[in-house]
Image (cartoon, grey):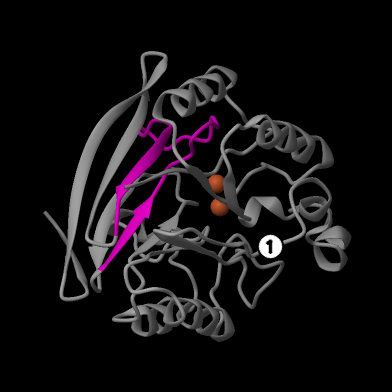
């Protein structure tokens, strides 16, 4: 059985130190085989924040898999944003913006959905391009049938109705139509700082909230998700920060039948 820890939106620069230390304790207790980080590693993409983030990543004893978010691009240093948008990411984190990892039981496909600009006012919005959609479906088509397929992208493919004003990822409809029946099992995201799990088009859409920052929505604590299972059944255990520790908040079970996922 595969055990993956999904954390997101750490936002170095706005870190809650006690929560970061609590995350370390949870990692040691839960012993995941992989930590998945779905973007917004920093708050303002400064060298100082990236250095702090890199120190944290280097301290992990567990392998990690990471994609960038919109906050990992500079907001106010416009020249940097347009000419060297990922310079700090590549200097401090890794050369890749779109990681890929394949183990015996699962595959992680990472895509970069943050954009330095677009034909809209809010450049925090994300997008998946036709070539990224094709990349995802091609990777899955070459994978063993029994291998769990997970897409990791910062921006959300589904939102609860009350949060839709925060914008779904651009290109979503084309992406979901292409992913339907492709063998993609789970889409992991962050960005909205809200944790939830939801089945859509036969796929599990699961978001972690901000795991370690003070950028909290009202009545929404810091959170992470523990994902356990295989290509046939999965449990996603949502953990919330409560009374000085991350504690299990809700566990949702899913099973796969005829190529579709259902909540049990
Ligand atoms: Fe964020
Ligand atoms: Fe974000």
**In which quarter of the view is residue 181 placed?**
bottom left
Decide: is 182 above or below 52: below
Decide: is 200 above or below 29: below
Give the residue drawn at x 36%, y 71%.
Answer: 184
Q: Which residues are magenta?
A: 203-230
Q: Residue furthest front?
A: 104
From the viewer's side, name the closer residue of 51 and 148.
148
Decide: is 216 above or below 230: above
Q: Is residue 65 left or right of residue 93?
A: left
Give the residue drawn at x 32%, y 68%.
Answer: 146
Query: Is residue 63 visible to us here?
Result: yes
Q: Where's the C terminus, which quadrant?
A: bottom left
Where disc 1 sits, the SS reads loop
Q: x, y percentage for residue 208? A: 41, 45
Q: x, y percentage for residue 213? A: 55, 32
Q: x, y percentage for residue 6? A: 44, 44
Q: Is residue 127 left or right of residue 162?
A: right
- The residue indicated by pointer 1 is 97
From the viewer's side, name the closer residue of 114 and 97.
97
From the viewer's side, name the closer residue of 36 and 34.
34
């Amino acid at each position: 059985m595969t055990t993956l820890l999904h954390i997101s939106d750490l936002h170095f620069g706005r870190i809650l130190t006690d929560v970061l230390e609590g995350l370390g304790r949870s990692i040691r207790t839960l012993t995941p085989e992989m930590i998945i980080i779905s973007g917004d590693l920093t708050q303002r993409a400064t060298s100082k924040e990236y250095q702090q983030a890199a120190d944290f990543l280097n301290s992990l004893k567990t392998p990690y898999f990471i994609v960038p978010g919109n906050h990992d691009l500079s907001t106010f240093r416009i020249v940097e944003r347009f000419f060297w948008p990922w310079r700090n990411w590549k200097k401090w984190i890794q050369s890749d913006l779109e990681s890929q990892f394949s183990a015996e039981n699962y595959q992680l496909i990472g895509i970069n959905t943050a954009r330095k600009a677009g034909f809209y006012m809010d450049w925090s919005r994300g997008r998946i391009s036709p070539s990224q959609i094709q990349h995802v479906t091609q990777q899955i088509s070459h994978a063993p049938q029994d291998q769990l397929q997970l897409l990791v992208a910062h921006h959300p493919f589904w939102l609860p109705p009350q949060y839709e004003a925060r914008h779904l990822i651009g290109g979503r409809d084309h992406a979901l139509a292409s992913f339907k029946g492709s063998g993609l099992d789970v889409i992991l995201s962050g960005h909205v700082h809200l944790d939830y799990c939801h089945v859509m088009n036969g796929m599990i859409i699961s978001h972690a909230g901000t795991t370690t920052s003070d950028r909290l929505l009202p009545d929404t604590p810091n959170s992470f998700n523990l994902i356990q299972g295989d290509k046939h059944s999965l449990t996603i255990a949502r953990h919330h920060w409560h009374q000085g520790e991350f504690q299990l908040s809700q566990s949702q079970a899913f099973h796969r039948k005829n190529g579709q996922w259902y909540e049990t």
